[in-house]
Structures are given as structure tokens and as C-alpha cells.
Image (cartoon, rainbow, N blue to C red):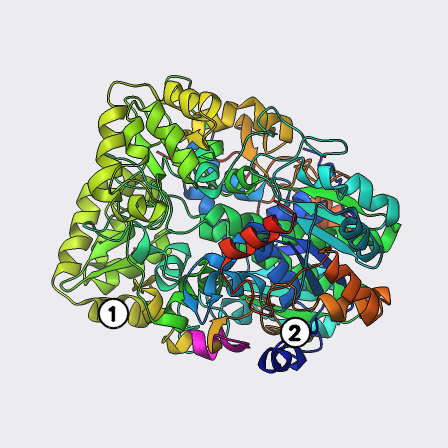
Amino acid sequence: MADIPKTNRDILNKQRIFPPQGPLSGLRVLDFSQVLASPYLGTMLSDMGAEVIKVEASYGDSSRAYGPLKEGEAGYYITQNRGKYGLCMDLTNPKAIGICKELAKICDICIENWRPGIMTKRGLDYAALREVNPGIIYASVAGFGNFDRFAPAPGPYSPRVCYDVIAQAESGHQWMNGFPDKAPHGLDVSWSDMNTGTHEAVAIVAALIQRIKTGRGQWIDIALTDSMIASNENVICMVSMAADDVPSPVRNGLRRLSISPYGVFKAKDDYFVIGVDNDKRFARLCEAMGKPELARDPKFDTNLHRLKNRAAIEGIVEAWCAQRTVEECVKILRDQHSVPAGPILTNTEYVKNPHYRARQMLVPIEQPRAGVFEMEGVVSKLSRTPGRVQGAAPMMGEHNRSILKKYLGYSDKEIDKLYDELVIVDNIDLAYGYNVDVARAKAKEKGGDK
Amino acid sequence: MKLQAQGPLVGVRVLEICEGQEGPYCGAILSDLGAEVIKVENLEGDYTRKLGPFKQGESAYYISYNRGKKGIALDLSKKKACEIVKDLAAKSDIFIENLEPGAIEALGLNYDVLKEVNPGIVYGSVSCYGRTGPISKYPGNDIVAEAMGGHTSANGWPDGPPEPLGIAVSSHCSGAEFAWGILCAYLHRMLTGHGQYVDVSVSDKNISVTENVLALATMVNVTRGRSGGHHPIVGPYGVYMAVDGAYAIGCGTNEMWGRIATAVGRPELLTAEGWATNLDRGKNRLTHMIPLLTEWGKGKKRDDIVRLMRDESNVPCGACATHKEVQKDAHYRARGTVVDIVQPKAGKVSVASAYANKMSDPRPMVQGPAPLLGEHNEEILQSIICMTSEEIAKLHKQGILVQDLEPKQPT
């Protein structure tokens, strides 16, 4: 684009993504993700070395407007999209769809989390992409799963609209979260999105392993509700064992339902957690409290007995905690007696915690406008082929030009034409600002995607 | 009970010395995906065998995390038992452990030892704090990791205490992360022949799944508080009570709010002061929205509300299902997410799988029941390290192999 101001040219010229490093290096991902579940998945793939090309519709991923905001860049978007290349195009334009299909030919994996049916409407569903690339591994995330042709496991609820808050509800998690005498409440973050992204990542690498043997790709379709239902500890099995007239379990406030003493306790100055999940650890807890005889007391000697006498044993623990500060409790329990226990940290506390620093869980990245700040590191630590945070999150359409040149052999002139025809767009010239609503209005005005 | 393997990992052998949650859940995932997972237990077995509820002596907890695995049990305080495990590891592709810090070294089954007998082995450890860092020497579990990872502090109401997550979703999420790390390493091995060590910390995973919360601290230094699960900047977005249950609603736009306001008989609130924008509704959730919908929900049945909102008003809305409902629901049965298995003692029970049926070629499935203690001792030793029945009988007699095929119902 001819009218990019000089400073923004500089932004474009700076390489902010490193050469890939990790066990997935050499693999390429076409990422049609938005907001959280699949963006998080794409980041996991990027962290392990895959080259991830994020394709945004012309109005941008809506999380570009989610806070915290700094210099117009969104912490939400950056967190879920660091280390990716960014394309931005009008996905209602057949030319744009053609470009996506060309890219699908040279990609190993395609991920998406649009409402079921949207990718079919665009001509970018599994059926369409496997025609151009039979080996492609196509991974969808929807609330209740996909239902169009080739969908692995359609079900009656598949057409329903679903966000994280609904998936938490329908999977049983919210009913179990909170105090029994009060309304249940949502979990602290959008667990279903990130939990499903993580589960889907496992399926993708399993499919890659399978593809080495057979050469065939496949469609993976794990729904938000699937991963959350699978993440229910023992409760699905528990209710299947119970007679029909036994009521379903209900939330239990500060303590987990089927283990004791296990939950949040109050020390002299603040709350903290104790997690005694077996008899060995219970014996250590008794030792730590100076009451070793409790471990042999027939009222408390097994978890089943402790559950029957829950108020009594948890009362003893509460009384002990009430005389000490959190620091003292944790020191005695965790450090001196190897009882699982720990402080309850907030986000501004854990980012300062030396343990996370030692484990390189806080990694600085440099964004073009927001500057340098720290974000989550790579969770799985591999000794021989470690992954890494591969770099910054892209601005809208930041790599339009470089990706089309590098992989599809487009010339600058051809790319200029695509810009003129509004097949591809970007917001690097700041005409759209970083405001998604303005971008959307602008795209609409130009007759783009909506 | 014979296991049936189907899925992308058929032919991969996993040796698991894990107990509790994250490690066994990783093993269950690998089994769902078709791997042969051999669970190694000590004398008394995985401690979740003692966590209830129970049916005919079998534990719901143990079954949930260990379906589809084969079981071998040994007295690991005996050197010979550890030698046998080492022999099995020599014939395995993947080894996973989650014992307390130092325990696997004490058994002589740490990575440095096993890579001598099997250089290509992918060896994984999952633990509360990871195997490096200043507090890695302490044991922990999901509840501690959630607290350390910033979740507990933000779960609950602004005027109430911090609450643990009702269900240990973090242990499943971390178990899946562990499977991811392991399989990435296994993929690398397929391409190069090299094995490696994988270290996963549940606390690390907890701070990785915080949406924008970590950025909130590092970009603008804002501490996140508790909001009762209600969205602070859009609304209504959260859980509300009905007379016989609760439901969740996720309103994202003003148009949608208009439909909700009409459904609850207050159409004027679409444009009323304090209600008109998402920001208003988010900010005033405690004083406006929660009282309004709580009052409106009194005397109304949950399913009627969901029908009104979701089906008639086109608003994203769903019931806060109980687990009994989930377990019986036709949708999750159709998807293979909830499946029935037949345990040797407890009989037919249900378990849940994120993978069963969700991949098109080949389709993963829950391979079968969870093993009784030492149920497959003979089969495993015969087929993998070619022991004779006589040798195996001798090991049983010496107390090196153990077995309990008639578990007592705890009282």
C-alpha cells in the first residue's frame, strides 16, 4: 500500500517471529480461529514449533477489542495469538476463499471454531479442503459438535449456539460450583474453551502420528461440552452407580465433595488451601498438627470415615489453622511435613512468584505498539526439543504480503490488486485504528464480510 | 475382560506408574486414542481405589481415571519388582509417572536409568510444581495448583471467600497437556528415533489457562477480583436461579438484551438508564441484573425458562445440568462422550471421554473397563517379557506380584 506512513513501514519491516523451534517445527497450520478455544489451540501448536498462519475475516477477531488494552493492542488477543502470522481477508469473496484453498494445499493442519455451518457456507469445510489436500488434519471446536456432512459424531444439540458459559452449565460444572445454599456460579475463567483447545491439541498430534503411517488426514471434532464432561472427576461414574432415587450431587462450598479434608481453610490472616487426598497424607497432616493419634482414630482413619465425620475432622483442622498465619501454616504443612498445601495467589501475586520465574513461565515478548511485556510460557517442557514462545501476535493483516509472496508466489503488483479489490485488508495504516467496530464499519462500507 | 484397541495410537505401548488424577487421566486419554496402557501399581494400589463411592468394592474414582488400561501390581519395595518394571519399560514406547518428588528415583526408575535400557523412550513426569524450581521438592495436587495459579482467588463472590473450583477441571486440563507434551515427543521420536524427558507442572498449566488475566497483571498491573462468574463488561452473562434449578445465559449484544428484556416482561429496560449498554449491565450486575432475574425466576421452572430464552427468544441459554442429567442425555450418548462399560465387579457403569468417536479415521473409543488390582499380571508378563506361567506363579508366591480380584466393599 502506497500510503503507509514511514513509522508503520518500520513496524512491517521488523521480524517479530523467530525461526520455529520445537517438535512440530516444519509443520504448517491454517488457523481460522476466533476469540479463545481455537486461538489457544493455535498458540499451543505454535509454541511447539508449528508455523501458524492465522486467517482473520476482514473485521478482525473480536478479541482484538478485549482488554487489557495498551496503545490500541489487546492483551486478550495477544495472549491467544502470539507467535502466529496474520492474514486478513474478506471471507465472503470467492477470491479470498481461493487463496485459503491454495494455502490449505501447503498446510498440514487446519483449525477453526466458527459456528457449525459457517465454514461450509464459505466453502472451507473439511469436505472442501480434503479435496485439495487429502492429508489435511481438520480440527473443529463447537459447543455441541458439528453436524454437517462427514461430521464424526453429530447429535441433536449440535445446531445450538453455545458460548463457554453455556458449556460450563450443560456439562455439570456450574451446578457443582459455589455454596449449596446459594445460587451456583460460573467458573473464574472460560475453562471450557481452553480445556477443549488442550484436548484438541492432543487429538491433532495423535492424528499426525496416524498420518505418518497411513498418509490420510481426518476431521477432529471435540466440542466444548465433550471436554468438560470428560473433566468431571468421578462424578459421571458416581451417578451411574447410584440408584435412580438418589439425588445428583450438589456443590459443596469451600470443600471438595468426595475427599476430606480437601479445600479452602481460613488461617488467622487469610484463606489458603489444604489438599489431603489419601491416608498417607492424612497421617502427615495429623503429625503436623501435633495430633498423630488422629490418623489411627477409627472415625478418621480412611477417607470414607473422614467423609462420614466430616464436620468433626474439618473442625479440628480449622481450629488449628485459625491460630496461625497462612505463611506459618504453609511452612509447617507443606515445607516441614510434605502435606499438599499452599497460598491462594492473585494474578498480580503469581507473576512475581520466583517458582514460575525459575520455570520460565513468564516470557517477555515485544509487540509493535504495546511494547515489551511478559506472558505465559510453554507448559510442556521437553528436554531435547523444547518449544518456545515463538514471537509476537500479528497486527491485522500484518503478513498478508509476506505470506502470499512466500508460499503462493504472488508478486507485489498482484497483491496490490488484491488490496484494491478488498480481497485482502489490513489495519497497519491505522486508518481503522485498532478499534474493531471502526474496522467492521469500514469493511461494511466497502462491501466486505459481515 | 478383553480390551479392544481402536484409534490413531494403536500399536503404541505406554507404561504408567501414576496415581491420583493428572497422570492417570493422561493414561486414560492415550488409551482412548488406541494405545496399550499398562498401569503399574504398588501393593495397595492407586490410592483412588479407596476414594468412593464404591460398588461391589470398586471405586468410581478409580474407574473414571483408569478405564481401558491393563493392570499389573507388584511390591515395589522389593528390588526384583523394580527390575520387572524396568524390563517392561525396555519394551515400551512411553513411560509416565506422577509419584511424589523423589519417589521414582528411589525406585530406580527415573529417566536416567530407563534411557540406558531404552534410549528411545519418551519419559514424562507430571506434578503439582514440576520437577525443577524452588518448590518442586514438595508434593501437591490440583487444589493447590489452582490456588497457586490464580483460579481460586477469583472463584466466588466479591463479598465472599475464595472458593475452590467445584470440580477439579484443572487436573483434567493438565492431564491433557501432559498427553500433548508426551505425544509431541513421541512424534519427534517417530521422525528421528530420539527419546526425551517431558516435565509438566499442573501449576504452570493453571497460569497458562487464564484467558487475559496474566496480561492484566503484566500489561496494566490490575489485580483480578471475584465476580461470581458474572461477566464484568457484558451482561446478562452468568448463572441465575429458577425454582427447581439454575440456568446460564450469555448475552453479547444490545439486540439480544432487548429480546431478554421482552421475555421477562420489561421491554422498557432496553433503553433505560443503567441498562442500555453492555458496559452498564456489566457494571450494575450486582445492583440491577442479578436482583431482576432472581426475582423474575422465582416460581418459574428451569426448563421453561431455557425454552423461553433459547428456543423462543434466540438467546444463548442453557440449563445448569446435574450430573444425573448429563449421564442420561441422548446427545452425549450419540457423540460417544458418555459411554457405558462393564466392570468385573461393579457391572455396568458410565464413564466420559472427550475422544471416543470424535475423530473420523480411525475412530477412538473407550477400550474397556478399569483393571482390578493386578488383574493382568500374567498376560502382561507373558506377552511382553515372555515369562512362563511357572515363573509368574513363583513371583506371586514370593509376594513380588500381587493381585486382589475380590475387592472388599469398604465400610
Helix, strand or loop at label 2? It is loop
Q: Chain of mark 1?
A: A
Residue A360 magenta-highlighted: yes
- Quarter containing the N terminus of chain A: bottom right
Residue that appears at 79% across and 57% down: A108
Q: Position of residue B387 (x, y in %)?
A: 76, 52
Residue B73 visible in the current orientation:
no
Q: CA distance from mark 1 to mark 2?
A: 65 Å
Count every numbered label the image shows and give the total.
2
What residue type is disc 2 on? Asp
Mark closest to the chain's N terminus, 1 or 2 = 2
Q: Nearer the viewer, residue B211 or B135?
A: B211
What residue type is disc 1 on? Ile
What number is the disc on residue B354?
A: none
Residue B161 magenta-highlighted: no
Task: Point out the stretch of residues depicted in magenta.
Answer: A356-370
Residue under numbered circle 1: A332
